[in-house]
Image: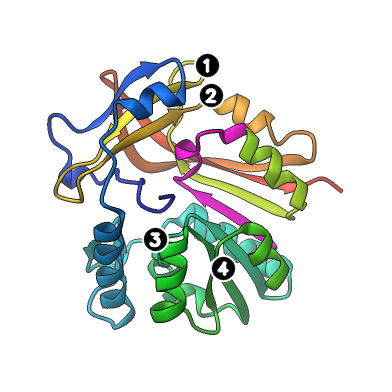
Amino acid sequence: MLSLIKSRIKLFLKKGTGWSGNYPNWQQAQQKCTGYDAANILTKVKTSILKVKNGDAVFEKDSVLFYKATYSYPLLSTVLWVALKNDNKISVIDYGGSLGSTYFQHKKILDDIKNLHWNIVEQKGFVEAGRNDIQDDKLQFFSTIKEAHTTHPADLLIISCAIQYMAQPYSLIAALVQFNFPYILIDNTPYNYKSLDRITVQKVPPAIYTASYPCWFLDYEKVKQAFAGKYSLASEYDNEDVIDLDGRKIRYRGFLMQLKK
């Protein structure tokens, strides 16, 4: 699931977890993966996000609860900047946004935006849970980008720590640019330390949930270039998160693309 395969919480990392391998294709990497019990994970995430919504915790990541406010300032400043340029109004599509992890993490500040629509695109089980128990007049859930964009035309598309889990990430980018979103933010994503694409297997720490699945470490420059026909680079930055690959420390990165006029 898009939202569930973002596990990079250093607190839980131990020997035997993390990223390894260099596979020739996605299918061979999948054969090395154990999968996961999607229903159990959804239940765990839902339980955590409801605690956040009810004020019992400040935010959650990968079902893990946090009790002190922590903001992703590059992401937050992007949302506020786009809203400021649009008369304090913004419609966001959060692709792979779980049950509102990013939204609730930043809700205290987002609530000051005069007119906000936060639209999460997720898989069926998450959409159903979101619509039944989470959504309100600002936060809504959709099964496809087209459905979300038709309902609330988006000023900003956010893909945070998700593109590396797509079987065909460049095909996804090619499809995204056809929507002509004014801005696209590819946030909090690790890239290969070499100038080439690499497929690994990620094993999630059991303290979060039991799972393993394929994960790309893409070529950073190649990913940016995939947007170049219709988009120009507005900004780029490093995130605080750092992971280990082959004994090298790799920092998560982000960049914002702006539709060319």
Mark 1 vs mark 3: in front: 1
* Residue range corresponding to the magenta coloring: 152-170
Are there few (<14), some (14-19), or many (20+) residues within 10 Å of tag 4?
many
Classify residue 76 as left or right of residue 234. Answer: left
- Whether residues under marks 1 and 2 lie with C-beta atoms below 8 angstroms apart, the answer is yes
Horizontal and vertical percent position of residue 31:
33, 26
Mark 2: which amino acid? Answer: Asp
Q: First in sequence: mark 4 or mark 1?
A: 4
How far separated are the C-alphas under marks 2 and 3? 27 Å
- Res. 74 visible in picture: yes
Are there few (<14), some (14-19), or many (20+) residues within 10 Å of tag 3?
few
Q: First in sequence: mark 1 or mark 2?
A: 1
How far separated are the C-alphas under marks 3 and 4? 19 Å
Classify residue 78 as left or right of residue 89. Answer: left
- Whether residues under marks 4 and 1 lie with C-beta atoms below 8 angstroms apart, the answer is no
Residue that carries the numbered disc 3 in the rendered image: 71
Mark 1: which amino acid? Answer: Ser
Colouring? rainbow
Residue that carries the numbered disc 2 in the rendered image: 219
Q: Residue at x 38, y 80 (%)?
A: 133
